[in-house]
Amino acid sequence: MNFDEFSNRISKIENLELPGTASHYKMAPLFRLKELEAGKIIKKNPKRAAVMALFYPNITYQTNLLLILRNTYKGIHSNQIALPGGKVEKRDLNLLETALRETHEEVGAVREQIKVIRSLSEIYIPPSNFEVTPYLGLYKKEEPFVMQASEVAAIVEVPLQDFMDDKKIFHQILNTSYAQNVEVPAFKLNGYTVWGATAMMLSEIKELFRQVL
């Protein structure tokens, strides 16, 4: 979809009710749903973080979604596909400030040129004890993205039509740092498996988009 048309339609999302946890659960791993049902997931003074779901035009002015591949490191979210963003720092005035700052640091997006449409439903990530607030933003991308090499291994540019395609959703058996041989629902985007909290956040965005696109 042409980016100008997309931008005009997306502005309607500002007034829609958020699908919330119902949309998150559609892409939640089965073991996580069982933990929720059993009341085993309890927030323990979670750390705060914010991410940005950034939509922008590609070279032919068609709409893309920006994802990143995180570097391999000693941590729970090592080598995973994610939305740009990160944890709150003391200098941040609020969570939106965190999302804008981290997006600039990780991919070079000029924060003043990001049009923030709205915040989305928070999501709690038990393994890392983070509560994450996603934001939805539009970016005209007049300059190429620039990776922060210390944190980002690759920039993943996903066409809107692929993101909205239900055939891109599948199930896969994965081994993680905290669970072995677990079946998870996931998106297959640009050859990458997108699962967990990122997939859950994308699920809510996709449900909102279906109401306006």
Image (spheres, rainbow, N blue to C red):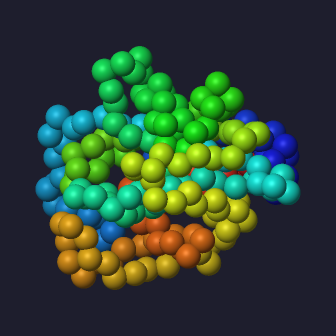
Q: Residue furthest front?
A: 149
Q: Position of residue 181 (x, y in %)?
A: 24, 82
**Left or right of 8 in this view: 67:** left
User: 112 above or below 8?
Assistant: above
- The answer to whether residue 130 shows anywhere in this view is yes
Look at 43% across and 80% down and name the residue there. Answer: 171
Q: Position of residue 139 (x, y in %)?
A: 69, 39
Look at 36% across and 74% down and name the residue there. Answer: 184
Residue nearest the viewer, comparing 55 with 197: 55
Residue nearest the viewer, comparing 90 with 202: 90
**Left or right of 144 in this view: 77:** left
Residue nearest the viewer, comparing 26 with 150: 150
User: 68 above or below 13?
Assistant: below
**Left or right of 21 in this view: 12:** right
Q: How many marks?
A: 0
Q: Position of residue 23 (x, y in %)?
A: 48, 56
Res 54 quadrant in image:
top right
Look at 58% across and 60% down and name the residue there. Answer: 156
Res 115 quadrant in image:
top right
- The answer to whether residue 198 shows anywhere in this view is no
Q: Quadrant of the N terminus?
A: bottom right
User: 189 above or below 52?
Assistant: below
User: 145 above or below 105?
Assistant: below
Look at 16% across and 46% down and name the residue there. Answer: 42
Q: Position of residue 179 (x, y in %)?
A: 20, 71
